[in-house]
Image: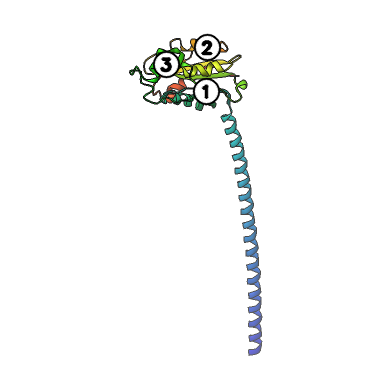
Amino acid sequence: MKKFIACFTAAALILSLGGCGQQTAEITTEQVQSTQADENTAEETTADAAEESNTTGEEDTAQTNSGSHVPVAYFSATGNTEAVAGYIADNLGADVFEITPAQPYSMEDLSRTDENSRVSREHDDESLRDVELVSTTVENWEDYDTVFIGYPIWWGIAAWPVDSFVAANDFTGKTVIPFCTSSSSDMGESGELLAETTGTGDWLEGERFRSAVDEADVTDRLEGLDLSE
């Protein structure tokens, strides 16, 4: 009888262990299937994110290139005109070309109260206003339809380094929008004189900005311009 009970107990123990093993196997299978499902979901999420990223990148590129037919060419003596040019370029997605004298102007050169300063001598002697530039060549110039030209006002006219740039380029078929910066002077005839210098292009009236103008003011002025191709 004791042997029978011992055998029965052993058999029950084996069946119990077998059942646990089967249950463990079933749990393990469920865990594997769950893990695979999670991995598949993660892969799908990653793929969706990558596709969305590519789409966003394409949209960003389109926005960046939206102003590819508009360059902003400018000469800046103290940084005020450069700031306005930057605001215009950022707002329109435009290209930028800096008009750079081969011999840069120092702060001493720009003193109008000193009759011996560079700008004073150039003002008094027009033959000195033919300022050599580092370059007058704008890449893909023929592709541009509208051109912004920026400069500070010197003695009521455009700073003369801009004359050298304007004289060296053909504005035929282009709309030209001059803009200037000054502490108190208006544009005067600066735009008209530049138009006479080149003799080509459709020159608009232009815009005058005060020195240290903020970006919001520049943006407001641009809203009224029709720059559609």
Identified by mark 1, the residue type is Val
Q: Where is residue 62 shown, x and y percent of the image?
A: 60, 30
Vertical arrangement, residue 29 with respect to residue 213, above or below: below
Picture quarter with the N terminus: bottom right
Q: Earlier in the sequence, mark 3 or mark 1?
A: 1
- To which residue does mark 2 refer? 197
Provide the secondary structure element on which disc 2 rests: helix
Q: Earlier in the sequence, mark 2 or mark 3?
A: 3
Q: Where is residue 85 shown, x and y percent of the image?
A: 48, 24
- To which residue does mark 3 refer? 122
Contact? badges 2 and 3 (CB < 8 Å): no
Q: Decide which of 227, 177 is in the foreground and name it.
A: 177
Q: Decide which of 197, 23 is in the foreground and name it.
A: 197
Mark 1 neighbour density, 10 Å: few (under 14) some (14–19) many (20 or more)? many
Picture quarter with the C terminus: top right
Image-based side of 107 in relation to 166, left or right:
left
Res 207 label: none
Identified by mark 2, the residue type is Thr
Quadrant in the picture for residue 80: top left
Vertical arrangement, residue 45 with respect to residue 153, above or below: below
Contact? badges 1 and 2 (CB < 8 Å): no
Q: How many marks?
A: 3
* 2 or 3: mark nearer the eye: 3
Q: Residue at x 65, y 83 (%)?
A: 8
Vertical arrangement, residue 170 with respect to residue 37, above or below: above
Res 72 label: 1
Q: Decide which of 209, 16 is in the foreground and name it.
A: 209
Q: Residue at x 55, y 19 (%)?
A: 147
* 1 or 2: mark nearer the eye: 2
* 3 or 1: mark nearer the eye: 3
Q: How is the image coloured?
A: rainbow
The span from disc 3 to disc 1 (Cα, nearest Å) is 26 Å
